[in-house]
Amino acid sequence: MKSSAKNIKLASVDDLFKTDEGRADDERERVQEIAISELHPFKDHPFKVLDDEKMMETVESVQQYGVLVPIIARSSPEGGYEIVSGHRRHRACELAGKETMPVIVRELDDDEAILLMVDSNLQRETILPSERAFAFKMKLDAIKHQGTRSDLTSTQVAQKLSVQKVGDEAGVSKDTVRRFIRLTELIPPLLDMVDEKKIAFNPAYELSFLKPEEQQMLIETMDYEQATPSLSQAQRLKQFSQDGRLTEDSMLAIMSEEKKPVQDRVMFTSDVLRKYFPKDYTPRKMEETIIQLLEQWKQRWQMQQEQQRKKRNSR
């Protein structure tokens, strides 16, 4: 009886007279006004915060209306708070001269914070390849760290499931996730060129297999040749590197090759063409019909040209 009595917890006076609404308020996340100086960027934050035109628009909005959506942060062991979601709003408040801003403070471990930080930023309309690459990598590492029981799932299967999860939540394939993460192996100057669209994604993926010193040598060669590698050139550079044959001379020989011009192509998706054909038409049947119609059009066009030529000669 004595032990049972010890386990009985008596409600405080405040709890006894608290309304249901009051109890609900206690459970809700509270918005606090926290000093701008107490808020610090997330460690290794992969998303760039630029003082560009969009930032200036955000600054104007903050000056006129304030911060409409609180940022999310967590307590930092070093003091202050680490921003999890809302780096651009924080920077806008700095530029607007604000001293405080609304913040929701959550108790998050490292993995939970990374997942929230990445997912909240991947919703943006415009994301640079480097941002997506490091974001995917951080999220994948966090999911792996959270882990699955090794006695139920092998490490190899667990890794595949983790990559699949990252892809599914981002709306891309697991192969796309892997290819983006591979870009994190590029040295910063090359990755900047990918962001600036000076190097396309597919060649960049191949170049990521070059050793760091080979990538640096490539930058010097590109500067000398005033050219960036095509996909086929990047693939050969990768092969030479893997074979241990990538030297300054071999790299220069590959990069100095004249690129073949890309032929103009006209492409139609089946969705575009489907509305012009019966439902039972196969792609092959659609192609044959298109060729026949083009042949008829060509004959009519040639006849019109011939008639016009005769008219000109008769004048």
Image (cartoon, rainbow, N blue to C red):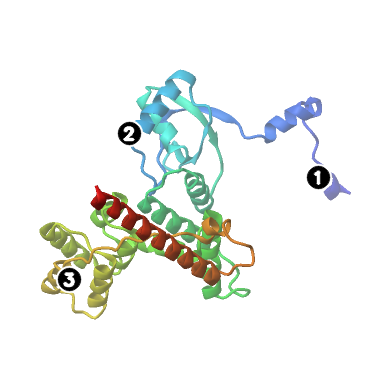
Q: Find residue 182 and report its image quarter.
A: bottom left
**Residue at x-position 40% and y-position 26%:** 59
Q: 302 above or below 33?
A: below
Q: Which residue is mark 3?
A: 254
Q: Nearer the viewer, mark 2 or mark 1?
A: 2
Q: Find residue 30 and report its image quarter.
A: top right
The amino acid type of the residue labelled 3 equals Ile
Marking on residue 6: 1
Q: x%, y% of residue 273?
A: 53, 58
Q: Secondary structure at mark 1?
A: helix
**Residue at x-position 58% and y-position 56%:** 275
Say if residue 166 shows up in the picture.
Answer: no
Q: Nearer the viewer, mark 1 or mark 3?
A: 3
Q: Earlier in the sequence, mark 1 or mark 3?
A: 1
Name the outermost residue toward the bottom.
243
Alpha carbon separation for disc pair 3 and 2: 39 Å
Alpha carbon separation for disc pair 1 and 3: 82 Å
Q: Secondary structure at mark 2?
A: loop
Do tag 1 and tag 3 residues touch (Cβ < 8 Å)? Answer: no
Q: Which residue is mark 2?
A: 51
Left or right, 287 with reference to 151 = left
Alpha carbon separation for disc pair 2 and 1: 60 Å
Q: Earlier in the sequence, mark 2 or mark 1?
A: 1
